Amino acid sequence: MGVATIYAAVHDLDLDIDLAERHRSGDARAFDEVYERFGEMVYNLALRLSGHREEAADLTQEIFLRVYRHLGSFGGRSTLKTWVFRVAVNHCRDRLSRHALLMLSIDEETGEGGKAFADPSRSPEELALAADDGRRVAEGLAHLAPVFREAVVLRDLEGLSYEEIAEVLGVRVGTVRSRIARGREQLRVSLERGQ
Amino acid sequence: MNRHVTTEQLSAYLDKELGFVEMRQLDAHFEACPTCGARLTSMRRTLRGLARVERLAPPPLVTQQLRGRIAVESALSPSPVRRLLRLVSGLPLQPALRTSLAMGLTLVASLFLVTHGVERESRNLVPPASPEPQTIVETYLGDSPMMPLPLTTSEIAGLGTFVLTDEGWVQDGLEGERPEARVDVGSPEGRALLTQYTNLEFLVAEGYTVLMRDNLETVELRSSGTPDRVLGFEADPSVPGRGLRSVSA
């Protein structure tokens, strides 16, 4: 890790702590900023862990209510990003284990959920192929065991580092490496079989 | 290297999480071994598929409902309505029904606020935060043959929700985990934890163990001595408006 990277990380952490202090002191914009930064990530995480748009919307609300209640106690022992993801994963586990509501197929084209982000640099044919690939993978993800699905979603969909995932899940980096590998392998095999 | 590449090596190779020497060894192996080469190609295809999984923006309704719930929560805390909202959000109902119920309660509470002259600026997502009295223990009461038994939970600032189980208090998300370390409340580490987290002592006061996360480690906090029997809790006059202290036998 270079000096610039360390400086950027420390700077980000200072910003995170500042946000929490502003929230504690009653600055309403602090929570708005947190929602702005993490709303989309949390919604997509909840969507992939639950496999259900309506449940993901509900989970997102509940997660941010928790964030709102506890943001003032954020002390900077981790980054705000991993803290929010941790709240999110714990809440999803809690809720989904109680309801066992994993839907095994997500119809991306229907429903009244959120809007997809468009990529203007790709042709309609490329977009259609990519969407089809993405749909098959999303369905494959829904069949993974929850511990593997969490690790793969955090790594490959949310782009967290192994160390960040270890913090979010509260496990060692070696465990994260193993879960990601096994989750990807199961997904690979299921996709190969499906072809 | 003669053996086939393991699943973990393949995954770490694609993430460039291996050292220079091992990366070069695997480069050479993938060139020479058709089986592993095919697995590499297949895994690359899988990762490309993962990168194509559609990302969605949260529906606008999520933001609107969240705004409403936060406004009501911060205006009413802590009140029976807020407890009711929390109870509703914890019920094992279909999401649509749960949301409708919560929104209905929010509407009723909002009407109550309007008719009682409570005013709030609502241009931002949240209203200005007010000092939030801490809830030590919440027990959801009420029986229904259709519902599971209510959970007894406790909120500890900085740690989140704890659930009372047969094994003692367990931090939300640590269910079923084994402790990596055991800490006695009388030890320096135990005292440090009690100092760091306000009200944590109430969880161990009744002789329960507490399974919690501390510094990425799962810790079981317990009292080795014979605990005083806690008869109940009363307001702590040294912390006006927010503190509770235990009353022991």
Image (spheres, coloured by chain):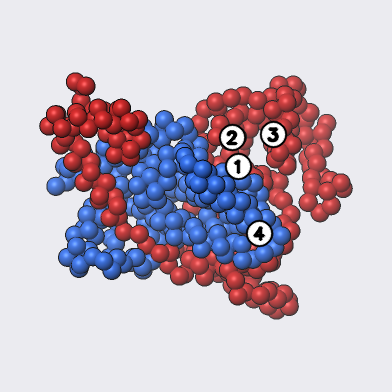
What's the CA distance linking mark 1 and mark 4?
17 Å
Tell me the chain of label 4. A
Q: Earlier in the sequence, mark 3 or mark 2?
A: 3
Question: In this view of the protein, which residue sits in the foreground, A120 or B242?
Answer: A120
Residue at the spot 56% in from the left edge and 63% down from the top edge: A33
Q: Are marks 3 and 2 on the same chain?
A: yes
Q: Is residue A174 above or below residue A149?
A: above
Mark 1 → mark 3, Cα distance in angstroms: 14 Å
Which residue in the protein does label 1 denote?
A77
Which residue was labeled with disc 4?
A23
Q: Are marks 4 and 3 on the same chain?
A: no
- Quadrant housing the C terminus of chain B: top right
**Which numbered disc, 4 or 3, marks the residue closer to the eye?**
4
Please tell me in which quadrant of the rendered image residue B194 appears. Answer: top right
Are discs 1 and 4 less than 8 Å apart at CB?
A: no
Q: Which residue is mark 3?
A: B193
Horizontal and vertical percent position of residue A41: 44, 56
- Are both tags, 1 and 3, on one chain? no
